[in-house]
Image (tube, grey):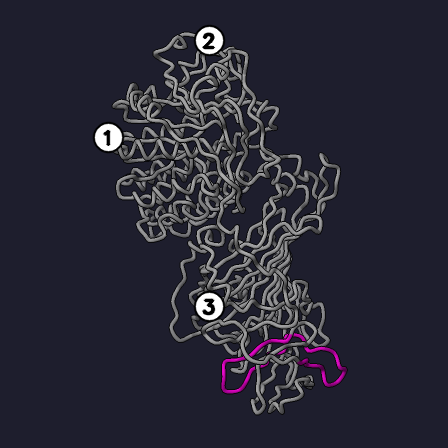
Amino acid sequence: MLFPTTTIKVYILFLFMTILSSTKLFSQKLTDEFITNFSGLVKDKRIVLLSEMSHREGSVIKTNTELVKYLHQKKGFNLILFESGFIDLGFFSRTDSTANYRENLSDAIFPVWTKSEEFQPLLDYLAEQKKTLEVGGFDLQFSSDHMYSSFIDSLRLYTPIEDKEKWESFFYVFDGVVNEAYYPFKEYPLGLYISKINKLSKLVEGDDFLQQGLKNYKEYLLILKSGVFEVEEKDFKAKMANPRDLQMAKNVIYYANKYPKAKIICWGASAHFAQDFSSFENEEIKAFKPMGGEIAKELGKQVISIGYTGGTGSYKYWFEDINEAKRVVLNYNGKFEDDCNKMDSITIIDLNTTHLKDSLFSSSSIEYTPLKGKWSEVFDAIIFQKEITPMHQIEEKQDIQFDTSFITNSYPLITSTKILKKTGAYKRGEVLNQVDGTPVSFCLLKIKGTQAGTVCDVDGKYEISIKPGDTLLLSSSGYEKKEIVFNGLNLDFNLKPSEITLNELTIFSEGNFAEHIFNKVLENLDKNYDLKPYNLDFFVRHKITRNNKLRYNYEYFGQYYFSYYGNEANSMITENRLFDFKPFKSFYFSAKKFHHDIANPILTNSIFQNKQLKKYNFELIEDDRFYLLKVYPKKQRYSHIKEEFYITINPIDYAVLEFKCINITDPKIMTDAFYKLYKRNDKNLLPLQLSLSERIYSTKYNKNFNGKYDVVYGVWDNYVQGYNEFLEEDVNINDHKVYIPYNKTNDIVSKCNDKEAQDSQYGTVKYNKDFWDNFNVPKIALKDQLIY
């Protein structure tokens, strides 16, 4: 944002956008006359700054796409730089030559473009022409979900082997800064951290890209420290953007000097590509030093800066509803747009060869704000489009109909290696406690000699495809196993609770009994769990509600790799589908990577890995039928987050039956954190006063017929409550995910592409109708109760 009278969302928020559905598009074709005039202006220029008014004009994206193609094909331009992460796109261009080029490129560029329908043809073109038209970025902000992690990995290679551990705190902060857009200045003094950056810059002296990347990172930290992102919109001054624009200019100049024969297209906002506002009447804009001016100072006549304006129409972001579109109003102060409106539908005006060269006139080329000054000192030319049209949603799933209902009686745990639609006769039954008649929740049922089976739901009910004469095996923690030959009629069974005797329990006469119990859990991990590397398929269902109204409905299928002794767990998404998305700007919740928390904490949570039990407090809450331990750090990792673990343990074999984690965040600190991230967004939907911010995730285990415990399923919930002072309403948001494992195998084990998994839930994995048509959707109630 450059002016208090306009609204623009902070670009860092573009990291959190997601895909929507679509509408029709409007196009304005380029005329031969326009192309001739455009070509005459570009001539032999080496750098073309191709702008757009506010990142919200679909028609401008379409026009600029055609101009990019023309510059590439007819003028020999071979490098395009986007207003997206220098680090993200720079590392992408260094490493990516895979079949996923288009998807990875889409991730590396800010989603404000890549998730719009209008931008898709340009992505297609860049993928097709990747050998002759390379891609980079010039923004110091981070635009990708995971490219920065590859940048970190490259930096790690330069740190001395003997100092690897000392550098981990540096990279830990790096990761937090990128993901949270926040620097923990109190915990890590900025001066000391900057000195580490400088030291690292010397270590990577032979790699100019890594050096330039570190300069961007350092400048980004300084901007965070300055508090620019925290300033109220009404208090924001244009000059506050100067440090960012200066670094972006340096990034373009870096590319120009590194590749002296390259011809470069830059794609970004008009405000950044402007050159000089010193002649303007507005005092605030006069203090702004845009990157276009810095580039022109360094590279002179090699550069041409092209602005944009429009006559009528409307504009909006692709994720906004059509009723949120803003109308383009002609500016009559200097009659520039009014005069242009008498021309063709699309025209390019040379500001240096007309009567406009030394004229003071008013135009709305910068974010639709009327400004009066010498526009010939701002841009070399301005493209005028008679009708501006807004961005639109991607037309990816418009004709796909989904059954979004959940059957709540059972879900498969063990299936054949190929997941098929249900065939044959499925029969229903239930499993009850032989003593008191209560349901046996999550009892495992398997047909002997096969891989066919299922699991009871929370009410002990199930359904299974079985024929007379099949032998059914029943197993559940805390109960004796049972083996029954199916008679063709009855599928209701009773299980007898296991008897616990004093000989089966370990009695401690002194010390912390709860800690002793957990030590026994660690001692019996090998006996109770499969700790060898293995692969499995998994399914995740994700829903978000705001004030009890469904806003997001999504599911995906993927593959996991686990290795306890290697302390590794990574995954990749192979299939996904989006049922419904209604954007709400209060908070953003994401499926990304959160399945990792609930996939198998025995193998992934550090409390089972590092065995540094002195760092934790242990309390025994219940010891009736199961041990229930409350475990929490003696010193919390973050001062504003209270973390507690609740672990349900079988007293017979010391196996974990359920692992639950509760994170409670200080509402005031959380309010401030969201305010920093979202204050440039539509504040009318932002609940500024939070009363609750709580995350709870649970994983349920059950014993299989090999005597080992497996994950049955996991549930992840994020609760936020607050008060929206603008709309004067209470806000209640629940982000809910269910994780279900499939098809575990230890035979041929391979690692998964963890970096791909971080993004591929959204957009990069295309909808596969054949897969979902043949997929047996798991059956699990979204409100199933676990043991505790």
Q: Are marks 3 and 1 in contact (CB under 8 Å)?
A: no
Ranked by sequence position, the earlier of labels 3 and 2 is 2
Residue 197 or 16: which is nearer the viewer?
A: 16
Binning the other alpha carbons within 10 Å of mark 1 as few (below 14), some (14 to 19) or many (20 upward) gives few
Q: Where residue 293 sits: x, y (%)? A: 38, 20
Q: Where residue 347 sits: x, y (%)? A: 40, 22
Q: Which residues are magenta?
A: 429-456
Instruction: Specify the amino acid type for callout 1.
Output: Pro
Instruction: Tell which residue pokes out farthest to the left in this image.
Output: 261
Query: Disc 2 or disc 1, which is closer to the eye?
Result: 2
Q: Are marks 3 and 2 in contact (CB under 8 Å)?
A: no
Residue 439 or 342: which is nearer the viewer?
A: 342
Residue 542 belongs to magenta span? no
Residue 433 vs residue 561: left or right? Answer: right
The residue at which mark 1 appears reads as 260
* Quadrant that contains the C terminus: bottom right
Q: Which mark is residue 564?
A: 3
Query: Disc 3 or disc 1, which is closer to the eye?
Result: 1
Ranked by sequence position, the earlier of labels 2 and 1 is 1
Tell me the element at label 3: loop
**Picture quadrant of residue 66:** top left
Q: Residue at x 48, y 27 (%)?
A: 53
Tell me the element at label 2: loop
Q: How many marks?
A: 3
Q: Where residue 670 sits: x, y (%)? A: 64, 43
Query: Marks 3 and 1, Cα distance to the nearest angstrom?
Result: 50 Å
